[in-house]
Image: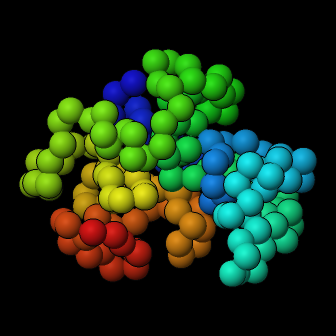
């Protein structure tokens, strides 16, 4: 898959599907049984002791809403979304930290960033789509797949951003 193909598929997901951020997901439908299964797997995120449970919001979603976390957006695309085959196409199941550790061509220089390159910061990952913008699935802001500004390049009017 080329960088442009990765970006195109992420944009297709953003534009054609209702999406929501949920830890440990990579494009599955927001059915109650699936959500309850994830809540058992990650109780600290779905039903934290110090915050309100996230279950009511997730369970209120239409069943066809697609759930992703940040790295799950990338894995879901590489694994063939919407017909996902887990750990296919040469990509094992990795979190954002493992992807960063395995990367061989890392840079803090944003002057020559290419479309499709991964943008990583501790605990989060997105994809560069060009023109100083990224696509990511985030629990911040609207909590869905969205376009954001890459603030290392510059702020963008009307877009949330990360540096």
Residue 2 seen in render:
yes
Closer to the camera in the image, 56 or 155:
56
Residue 54 seen in render:
no
Residue 53, x across and y down, in percent = 78, 74
Task: Assign the N terminus to one quadrant of the image.
Answer: top left
Give the total of numbered labels: 0
Residue 125, x across and y down, in percent = 40, 52
Above or below, comparing residue 31 to residue 51 in the picture: above
The residue lying at 64 percent from left, 48 percent from top is: 24
The residue lying at 21 percent from left, 72 percent from top is: 154
The residue lying at 43 percent from left, 47 percent from top is: 96
The residue lying at 62 percent from left, 42 percent from top is: 26
Residue 76, x across and y down, in percent = 57, 36
Q: Is residue 20 left or right of residue 100?
A: right
Closer to the camera in the image, 146 or 100:
100
Above or below, comparing residue 106 to residue 88 in the picture: below
Task: Assign the C terminus to one quadrant of the image.
Answer: bottom left
Q: Is residue 21 left or right of residue 91?
A: right
Q: How is the image coloured?
A: rainbow
Residue 73, x across and y down, in percent = 54, 45
Q: Is residue 38 left or right of residue 157?
A: right
């Amino acid at each position: 898959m080329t960088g442009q193909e990765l970006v195109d598929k992420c944009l297709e997901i953003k534009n054609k599907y209702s999406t929501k951020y949920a830890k440990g997901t990579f494009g599955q439908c927001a059915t109650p049984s699936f959500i309850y299964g994830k809540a058992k797997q990650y109780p600290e995120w779905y039903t934290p002791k110090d915050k309100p449970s996230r279950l009511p919001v997730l369970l209120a979603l239409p069943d066809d809403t697609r759930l992703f976390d940040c790295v799950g957006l990338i894995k879901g695309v590489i694994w063939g979304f919407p017909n996902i085959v887990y750990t296919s196409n040469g990509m094992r199941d990795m979190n954002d930290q493992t992807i960063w550790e395995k990367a061989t061509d890392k840079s803090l220089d944003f002057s020559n960033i290419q479309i499709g390159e991964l943008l990583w910061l501790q605990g989060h990952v997105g994809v560069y789509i060009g023109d100083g913008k990224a696509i990511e699935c985030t629990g911040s802001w609207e909590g869905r797949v969205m376009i954001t500004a890459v603030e290392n390049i510059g702020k963008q009017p009307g877009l949330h951003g990360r540096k």
